Amino acid sequence: MSEYEENLRNSYIEVMNGKPRGFWNKLQAVGEMVADGIIAKAHLQKMKTTNAKLIEKYGSGSADGTDDYYHPLLQCQLARISDQSMRNGIMLGYGKEVYDYNKKIKTQPYENVVADERKDLQNNLNGSKIGYINRLKSCLELLDDKRTQTMRDQYLR
């Protein structure tokens, strides 16, 4: 067996045994980031759907505060998956806030934009800690107290 074939065989064995190194480790990290991004997108869509239902039923302003539930919920769930997913969640959260900043700064006062950004980032960190510490518990239960009253009234999570 050539050295190349031996390295390929050893890499295959490492991957199959759940101990990837080098290229395989990087590939796994990229795959996990993609999966975490898909989860984050689904959470964002869930929040938008919830907000639309609340606004339709109760009017403007009724969805205020829902992000104080959805930010930590996403981070909690990612932190329960793995340490890498926990790191990915925090990175995705920073990326989302940069995107939001560039969008909001055009129409809102700087102080309001920065205050909301800080709040969201703190919610992300809190949710990540809660998920990391309580990996065997449901994030829906752990963060139930963060749901708004209108969410509770409509039995929304």
Image (spheres, rainbow, N blue to C red):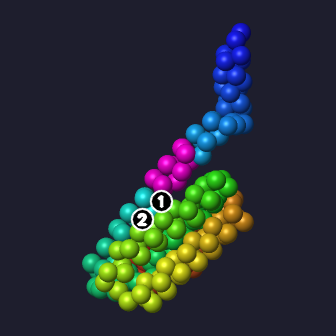
Find residue 115 and report its horizontal and vertical position in percent: 49, 86
Q: Is residue 10 left or right of residue 150?
A: right
Residue 5: numbered disc: none
Q: Is residue 49 visible?
A: yes
- Give the farthest residue toward the top: 1
Which residue is the site of mark 2?
A: 44
Where 24 sits versus 110, above or below?
above
Residue 150 figure quarter: bottom left
Question: Is residue 32 covered in magenta?
Answer: yes
Which residue is the site of mark 1?
A: 40
Q: Is residue 71 left or right of residue 141?
A: left
Where 2 sits versus 53, above or below?
above
Identify the residue at horizontal 38%, vertical 63% (top origin).
45
Mark pair 2, 1: CA separation: 6 Å
Residue 127 figure quarter: bottom right
Identify the residue at horizontal 46%, vertical 67% (top origin).
96
Magenta stretch: helix, strand or loop mostly: helix
Q: Are marks 2 and 1 in contact (CB under 8 Å)?
A: yes
The residue tagged with tag 2: helix, strand or loop? helix
Give the magenta-colored segment's residue range: 30-39
Identify the residue at horizontal 62%, vertical 59% (top origin).
87
